[in-house]
Structures are given as structure tokens and as C-alpha cells.
Image: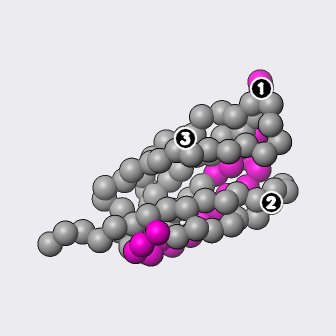
């Protein structure tokens, strides 16, 4: 049972659905933040969902650059988060 919370700079963008009964959860979810700027920090917090307390498995942080990028993040408590983001340029 796991999920990911998504942040961009000071903004909370939301969280993924909780994936149950799998040791390799997969999400294909999008979070939009129309005020995102280049060099802002994208932060992903990965949690294991439990009945009493959700355990933080790891935090992935990256300064965002223009374009589409894919990354691997190795979690402190084991496992890897593969993720991608797209940051577009503002139209003038």
C-alpha cells in the first residue's frame, strides 16, 4: 500500500491514489501547477499507507528545468521511484 505526495516550491499539488496489494506500485497520474518556474524544487514524498500511521519511505527533490525529464530516485528505506515531469516555457 503506497502513495506519493507532490509539491512544487511552496505549493502542495496533491497526492496519488493509494495502491494496495503490490510491492511495486505504479501510478500514471498528472499534477498541474501553472505557476511553476524553472529552478523551483519539485518534491515527491513516498509513503507506505498503514491503518494507524503512514511511514515515510523517502523524499525525492529536484530543481526543475524546462522540457520533459525522467529521473530515478533511490528511497532511504529501500526501493526506487521512477518519475517524469514536464515544465513548459511561459508564452510572452
Q: Which mark is residue 52?
A: 1
Label 3 secondary element: strand
Which residue is drawn at the image coordinates 29% and 71% (left, top)?
89
Q: Which mark is residue 76?
A: 2
Instruction: Check the image and report above or below for 34 versus 52.
Output: below
- Local SS, label 1: loop
Q: Earlier in the sequence, mark 2 or mark 1?
A: 1
Residue 87 in the image, given as x and y percentages of width and height: 39, 66
Instruction: Name the residue beneath numbered marker 3.
Output: 15
Q: Residues within 10 Å of mark 3 (few under 14, many from 20)?
A: some
In front: 83, or 34?
83
Tell which circle, 1 or 3, labels the residue nearer the N-terminal end.
3
| Disc ID at residue 62 | none
Residue 20 sits above or below residue 41 on the image: above
Please identify the dominant SS of the magenta region. strand
- Is residue 82 something one can see in this rendering? yes
Q: Is residue 60 magenta?
A: yes
Residue 46 in picture, x, y percent from top left: 68, 49
**Mark 2 neighbour density, 10 Å: few (under 14) some (14–19) many (20 or more):** few
* Element type at mark 2: loop
x then y, percent, for residue 44? 60, 55
User: Would you identify the image quadrant in which residue 20 lies?
Assistant: top right
The quarter holding residue 10 reads bottom left
Mark nearer the viewer, 1 or 3:
3
State the CA–CA distance, disc 3 to disc 2: 20 Å
Q: Residue at x 64, y 51 (%)?
A: 45
Range covered by the magenta-colored residues = 45-68
* Left or right side of 61 for 8: left
The image quadrant where one finds the N terminus is: top right
Tell how many labels.
Answer: 3
Amino acid at each position: 500500500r503506497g502513495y506519493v505526495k507532490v509539491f512544487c516550491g511552496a505549493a502542495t499539488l496533491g497526492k496519488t491514489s493509494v495502491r494496495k496489494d503490490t510491492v511495486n506500485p505504479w501510478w500514471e497520474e498528472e499534477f498541474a501547477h501553472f505557476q511553476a518556474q524553472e529552478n523551483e524544487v519539485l518534491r515527491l514524498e513516498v509513503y507506505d499507507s498503514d491503518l494507524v500511521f503512514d511511514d515515510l519511505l523517502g523524499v525525492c527533490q529536484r530543481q526543475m528545468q524546462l522540457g520533459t525529464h525522467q529521473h530515478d530516485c533511490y528511497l532511504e528505506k529501500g526501493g526506487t521511484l521512477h518519475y517524469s515531469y514536464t515544465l513548459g516555457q511561459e508564452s510572452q
